[in-house]
């Protein structure tokens, strides 16, 4: 499986971005997939995941971010609205392997990351 993340950029507070994670090889429907993010000097942290029909979000993004999949395009998305400066980070998509959805150690494949910068 190869994952290619894209869609990051520079936006002002309150703006929106949509991140994409295109998968090659096995389809995204075959696995639990997630978005994580990592700010400078911080640990990689969970943002959102899709497990079948269920979605999971970290508390700070609930109501602002939406994770989705397009099975025909074999692509996962993260729609990010009402962005805040604290959302600034490199965003990674990952394929879940084993263990808790909320820990990066549970994922075995990662995309290369896409930078999201929110200016105040």
Image (cartoon, rainbow, N blue to C red):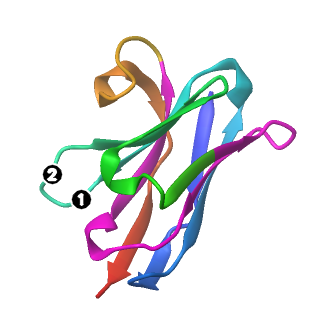
Image vertical order of residue 34 relative to residue 106, above or below: below
Magenta region includes residue 36: no
In the rendered image, which residue does mark 2 sit on? Answer: 42
Q: Position of residue 88 (x, y in %)?
A: 31, 68
43 or 111, nearer to the observer: 43
Q: CA distance from mark 1 to mark 2?
A: 5 Å
Residue 112 located left or right of residue 71: left
Q: Quadrant of the N terminus?
A: top right
Q: Position of residue 90 (x, y in %)?
A: 36, 59
Q: What residue sits 46% from the left and 73% below the top?
A: 82
Residue 40, quarter of the rendered image: bottom left
Q: Is residue 26 visible?
A: no
As helix, strand or loop, the secondary structure at mark 2 comes to loop
In the rendered image, which residue does mark 1 sit on? Answer: 39
- Crowding at dot 2, Cα within 10 Å, few <14 / some 14-19 / many 20+, comes out as few
Q: What residue sits 65% from the left and 22% below the top?
A: 52
As helix, strand or loop, the secondary structure at mark 1 comes to loop
- Crowding at dot 1, Cα within 10 Å, few <14 / some 14-19 / many 20+, comes out as some
4 or 99, nearer to the observer: 99
Magenta region includes residue 74: yes
> CB under 8 Å between callouts 1 and 2?
yes
Q: Residue lying furthest front in this view?
A: 63
Q: Quadrant of the C terminus?
A: bottom left
Residue 103 located left or right of residue 53: left
Image vertical order of residue 70 relative to residue 117, above or below: above
- The residues colored magenta run 68-96
Q: What residue sits 41% from the left and 11% below the top?
A: 98
Q: Position of residue 79 (x, y in %)?
A: 59, 60
Q: Is residue 88 visible?
A: yes
Q: Residue lying furthest right in this view?
A: 72
Image vertical order of residue 97 relative to residue 39, above or below: above
């Amino acid at each position: 499986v190869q994952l290619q993340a894209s869609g990051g950029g520079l936006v002002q507070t309150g703006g929106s971005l949509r991140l994409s994670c295109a998968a090659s090889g096995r389809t995204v429907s075959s696995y639990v997939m997630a978005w994580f993010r990592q700010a400078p000097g911080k640990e990689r942290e969970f943002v959102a995941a899709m497990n079948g029909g269920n979605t999971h979000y970290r508390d700070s993004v609930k109501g602002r971010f939406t994770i989705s999949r397009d099975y025909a395009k074999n692509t996962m998305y993260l729609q990010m609205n009402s962005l805040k400066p604290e959302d600034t980070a490199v965003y990674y998509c990952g394929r879940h392997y084993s263990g808790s959805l909320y820990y990066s150690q549970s994922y075995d494949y990662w995309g290369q990351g896409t930078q999201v910068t929110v200016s105040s």
